Amino acid sequence: MRFPRDDGSATGTGVGLRLPHIQEVVTTRPAARWLEVHPENFIANPHARELLLEAHRHYPISLHTVGVSVGSAGGIDRGHLRRVRALADSVDPCLVSGHLAWSTHDGEYLNDLLPLPYTEETLRLLIGHVDEVQDGLGRQYLIENPANYFGFADSTITEPAFLGELAERTGCGLLCDVSNVYVSAHNMGYDPYDYINKLPPRVIGELHLGGFTPEPDDAIPGAEIFIDTHADRVAEPVWALYGHALCRFGVIPTLIEWDTEIPPFATLLAEAARADQMMARAVESDAIRAAAC
Ligand SMILES: [Fe+2]
């Protein structure tokens, strides 16, 4: 079955398109609803970019930046932003997103998405940077909640409140990575359902689902820490939390992320089909509720 490209918007569940699958996707056009790519993989790779433009003829494309470091104290790399803008202008993305994190320092790109203290000072810095990113890209930007492994003692604002305030003051949207909520809640010792309940529903523009890897926690004998590896299927408790997110936020475009030990594309589609079924059930129960009122 092939899905034609319709009006270019992201509906239902999309999948992350990584370089090992791109030729196959362009050639066989599998039934993905939409595709999300990291623009940084295409900016300096003309062959991959050509394939992406071909994919764009058949699928809505979402851009998920990993190098636009909105949390860097040194400011936004405007040259990088211009390159992302050029790619965005050529694929007319249905969504554009990036992380609540920093990953550059003194012009050096680090291989990690590093955490921020949630304070008024950080909030002011982020507001300026998110404004700059949205102006530079000419599009709304969605900010994603990170996977956390530790917190800052000097944080004075909770993460959901920080994200809500950032959205309120910049007009950006939020990307709620449900797996990150689950991973962070386990690692930091809070309730993931309560976290979801504290995010403002009207600004949620996308949801992410991905696999994590439990590892022994060196600090606490016998305990486990969850690492956001995107190297596995979505875990059952994350599916349950996703069901709660659909109840809370409504039916929101959702992405299956898988970045390491990448499986056959059909496995990604099977995960996406499960999310689509849950969305359909959420719509059905909404209709039943509305009819009963
Ligand atoms: Fe994510």
Image: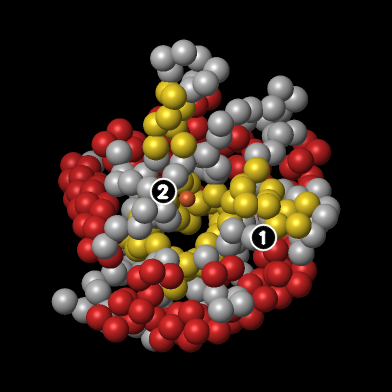
Query: Does label 2 point to a residue whose CB lies under 8 Å from ligand 1?
Result: yes
Measuring 76% from the left and 41% from the top, which residue is drawn there? 122
In which quadrant of the rendered view does residue 149 lie?
top right
Q: Residue at x 65, y 39 (%)?
A: 115
Three-letter amino acid code of the residue under disc 2: His
Q: Which SS class for mark 1?
A: loop
Residue 36, can we see it?
yes
Residue 168 seen = no
- In the rendered image of this protein, does residue 142 appear above or below residue 227? below
Residue tagged by mark 1? Answer: 68
In the foreground, 57 or 39: 39
Marking on residue 131: none
Q: Amino acid at mark 1?
A: Val
* x, y percent for residue 272: 27, 57
Query: Percent position (x, y) of residue 26?
Result: 33, 81
The type of colouring in the image is secondary structure
Q: Is residue 114 above or below residue 215?
A: below
Q: Quadrant of residue 76?
A: bottom right
Q: Position of residue 17 (x, y in %)?
A: 40, 67
Mark 2 = which residue? Answer: 230
Q: Earlier in the sequence, mark 1 or mark 2?
A: 1
Nearest the camera: 171 or 232? 232
Residue at image position (67%, 60%) is: 68
Quadrant placement of the N terminus? bottom left
Q: Is residue 98 left or right of residue 207?
A: right
